[in-house]
């Protein structure tokens, strides 16, 4: 099978790491926390991105030395794109305010089939669309028409609103064209390019007139009241906002002039330059002009936006298209030569579309059906997973104005949930996001997809439900190149051994990652490597020469099979360094009888024929011998158990053991924290290097 042989150097705590990623397969990389699994993910992603972020992984010890040990990733040639599932994915991509996952339309609907179907439909609209594409004058005209329409707003009853910009501009007459005689000296300012700015400036100065007999603008003498009144006259006669509206509208009207009939232009000239307030006839004319403009805008906007989305829910498409035809002869104010030059090509394109409406209806119908099938398949896939995992949520893909969006619903709530992230628990978000991630991978088809510790927080049932959803069935990642890094052995147990036939289509492979002195190596995990701890105990007892370590594993064996009788208690007493075996019955501890000792010894000898309590105890109590065993052991798990014996028998109350180390040692010792099936620590050493290092430091303190 083809594979990527990836080498990583000088990234965070990793001096070097070598991993293989088989193409078109599920690659599980299992290892304990702290060995650099997330660093491996970051290094691969940064190297593919080529955005300079790889340099941020440079180990701190190399940052000031200038020794040239920069982060390096090799062996990824051919990996052009990557998608990563991690905590950042859940927070940044999934559970958006108005949809379950960002760009749900792109992920769940916009397939190659969808794109080709849309292309066929869009080609039918090409005759209409071509009239708008690149036609800047038309786009500007539509914008100006909208501004003119909006300036003359109407009330609910359809009457021209006196609160509108247009009414305020012209309602009291055009005071820019008709300047009162007494204000003629200000004509150049009032008819400037920015009259409202000047009027506003002039009005602000009026508040300072009473501070002095000098003009606040030019400091000339204006002691006489009539002079001050003259200065105030401008702000009394002119409202800067109304003048601003008037000036802006006049520019728009001038630009639109070529689209108006001559009769309309003449009427507009008369109305907009009138000296007196608007007459009922003038208001009626402006209302009529606004109605024509509104109609034309509606037709142009409808034609510009014509698409599959605008017609998908229309029962009678032919009637709807006919409604878009622009009957310019009925728009008396706009029936000009220039407007005809715009409208005629559009109407011709519309006529061509009408002649092929049968094909259009067929294409839209087929496209809708394809989308419906896609929606049902995606909804069913996700909802079946949610149901199998015991969640009360489901998803529904709903049509939007120009797309589709996936929404989240709850079985106890009728409408969709807008703030999904606020209602879902961490586990629910994690499980949900994993399935959404799968669909994104299927949609975007990256060269590699990476799952960074995706299922360790779930119980067994949900773990299997997620693995089943991700790597089995028609909609799954079974043919994609997937790298899963995890500190959870269960995914490897499931896909490599327990239910391997169910996942064979995903071509699963699993490797154990171990790290010593910053060097990460991987060892393939085969089906036969996954054993019960009882099998591991039996195998190691037979293979190991050291009697103390044999006793450690045998004690574990009796604990696993829940045989806590005399043989278990005998070994426990021995490993605690007791001179004579004791028996713990509930809360009371007593010395074992000679008969019990004989029975325990007989049972232990079935596993260790040469077992002798006194000889092993003597070895344990000999500090040099047990310390030598500790130092000689190359297996982290054995080393940890020997450390526990050392501290029990030879440690002293002042020995400093951090809470973290103590917890790790204790949890590694007790069977209730082991999985039913696991890897033999003699082949797959899963004790982190830093734990062993700390144990060795503590052992050095024993006198």
Image (cartoon, helix red, strand yellow):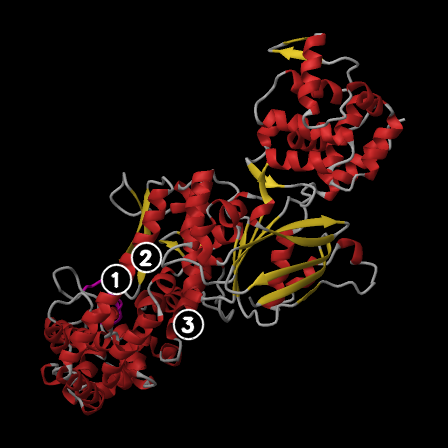
Element carrying mark 3: helix
Identify the mark at residue 347; answer none if there is no mark.
Answer: none
Other-residue count near label 3 (Cα within 10 Å), few / some / many at <14 / 14–19 / ≥20: some
- Quarter in which the N terminus is drawn: bottom right
Q: Secondary structure at mark 2?
A: helix
Q: CA distance from mark 1 to mark 3?
A: 64 Å
Write down the residue under mark 1. Answer: 373
Q: Is residue 570 left or right of residue 273?
A: right
Span highlighted in magenta in the image: 161-170
Prevailing secondary structure of the magenta residues:
helix
Q: Which residue is mark 3?
A: 198
Q: Nearer the viewer, residue 648 or 224?
A: 648
Q: Quadrant of residue 666?
A: top right
Looking at the rendered image, the disc whose residue lies closer to the viewer, 1 or 3, is: 1
The answer to whether mark 1 and mark 3 are in CB contact below 8 A is no
Measured as percent of width and height from the top left, residue 435 is found at 41, 52
Image point (51%, 62%), residue name: 481
Question: Is 107 drawn above or below residue 594 in the view shown?
Answer: below
Which residue is drawn at the image coordinates 69% and 19% (left, top)? Answer: 602
Labels 1 and 3: the sequence-earlier one: 3
Confirm whether the magenta stretch covers residue 430.
no
Separation of marks 2 and 3 at Cα, in angstroms? 63 Å
Secondary structure at numbered mark 1: helix
The answer to whether 120 is drawn above or below residue 409 in the figure is below
Can you tell which mark lies on residue 378?
A: 2
Lower position in the chain sequence, tag 2 or tag 1 = 1
Q: What x and y, as percent, mark residue 340? A: 18, 89
- For the point 30% across and 54% down, the residue is 379
Assess disc 2: are there few (<14), some (14-19) or many (≥20) residues with their C-alpha within 10 Å of its C-alpha: many
């Amino acid at each position: 099978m083809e594979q990527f042989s990836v080498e990583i150097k000088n990234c965070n705590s990793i001096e070097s790491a070598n991993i293989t990623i088989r193409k078109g397969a599920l690659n599980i990389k299992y290892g304990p926390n702290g060995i650099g699994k997330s660093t491996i993910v970051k290094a691969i992603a940064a190297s593919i991105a080529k955005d300079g972020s790889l340099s941020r992984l440079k180990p701190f010890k190399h940052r000031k030395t200038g020794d040239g040990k920069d982060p390096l990733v090799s062996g990824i040639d051919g990996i052009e794109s990557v998608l990563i599932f991690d905590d950042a994915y859940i927070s940044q991509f999934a559970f958006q305010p108005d949809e379950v996952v960002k760009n749900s339309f792109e992920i769940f609907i916009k397939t190659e089939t969808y794109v080709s179907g849309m292309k066929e439909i869009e080609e039918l609209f090409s005759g209409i669309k071509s009239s708008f594409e690149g036609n800047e004058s038309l786009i500007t005209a539509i914008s100006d028409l909208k501004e003119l329409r909006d300036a003359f707003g109407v009330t609910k009853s359809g009457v021209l609103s006196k609160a509108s910009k247009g009414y305020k501009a012209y309602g009291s007459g055009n005071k820019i064209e008709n300047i009162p005689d007494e204000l003629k000296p200000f004509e150049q300012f009032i008819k400037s390019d920015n009259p409202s700015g000047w009027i506003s400036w002039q009005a602000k100065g009026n508040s300072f007139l009473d501070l002095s007999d000098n003009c606040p603008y030019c400091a000339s003498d204006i002691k006489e009241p009539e002079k001050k009144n003259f200065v105030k006259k401008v702000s009394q006669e002119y409202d800067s906002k109304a003048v601003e509206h008037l000036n802006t509208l006049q520019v728009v009207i001038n630009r639109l002039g070529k689209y108006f009939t001559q009769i309309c232009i003449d009427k507009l000239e008369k109305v907009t330059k009138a000296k007196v307030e608007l007459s009922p006839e003038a208001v009626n004319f402006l209302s009529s002009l606004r109605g024509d403009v509104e109609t034309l805008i509606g037709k142009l906007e409808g034609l510009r936006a014509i698409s599959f989305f605008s017609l998908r829910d229309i029962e009678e498409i032919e009637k709807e298209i006919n409604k878009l035809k622009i009957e310019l002869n009925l728009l008396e104010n706009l029936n000009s030569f220039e407007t005809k030059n715009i409208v005629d090509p559009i109407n011709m394109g519309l006529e061509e579309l009408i002649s092929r409406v049968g094909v259009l209806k067929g294409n839209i119908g087929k496209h809708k059906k394809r989308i419906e099938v896609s929606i049902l398949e995606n909804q069913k896939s996700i909802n079946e997973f949610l149901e199998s995992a015991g969640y009360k949520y489901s998803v529904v893909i709903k049509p939007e104005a120009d797309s589709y969006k996936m929404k989240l619903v709850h079985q106890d709530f009728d409408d969709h949930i807008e703030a999904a992230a606020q209602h879902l628990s961490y586990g629910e978000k994690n499980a949900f996001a994993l399935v959404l991630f799968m669909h994104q991978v299927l949609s975007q088809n990256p060269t590699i997809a990476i799952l960074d510790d995706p299922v360790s927080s779930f119980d067994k049932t949900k773990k299997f439900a997620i693995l089943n959803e991700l790597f089995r069935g028609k909609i799954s990642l079974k043919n994609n190149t997937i790298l899963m890094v995890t500190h959870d052995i269960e995914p490897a147990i499931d896909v490599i051994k327990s239910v391997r036939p169910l996942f064979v289509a995903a071509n699963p492979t699993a490797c154990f990652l171990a790290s010593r002195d910053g060097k990460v190596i991987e060892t393939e995990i085969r089906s036969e490597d996954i054993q019960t701890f009882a099998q591991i105990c039996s195998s190691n007892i037979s293979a190991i020469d050291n009697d103390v370590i044999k006793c450690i594993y045998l004690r574990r064996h009796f604990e696993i099979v829940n045989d806590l009788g005399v043989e278990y208690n005998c070994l426990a007493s021995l490993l605690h360094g007791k001179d004579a075996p004791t028996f713990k019955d509930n809360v009371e501890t007593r010395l074992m009888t000679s008969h019990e000792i004989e029975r325990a010894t007989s049972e232990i000898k079935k596993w260790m024929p040469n077992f002798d309590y006194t000889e092993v105890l003597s070895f344990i109590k000999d500090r040099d011998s047990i310390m030598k065993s500790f130092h000689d052991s190359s297996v982290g798990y054995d080393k940890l158990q020997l450390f526990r014996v050392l501290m029990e028998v030879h440690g002293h109350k002042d020995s400093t053991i951090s809470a973290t180390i103590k917890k790790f040692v204790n949890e590694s010792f007790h069977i209730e924290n082991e999985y039913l099936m696991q890897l033999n620590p003699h082949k797959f050493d899963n004790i982190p290097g830093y734990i062993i290092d700390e144990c060795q430091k503590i052992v050095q303190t024993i006198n």
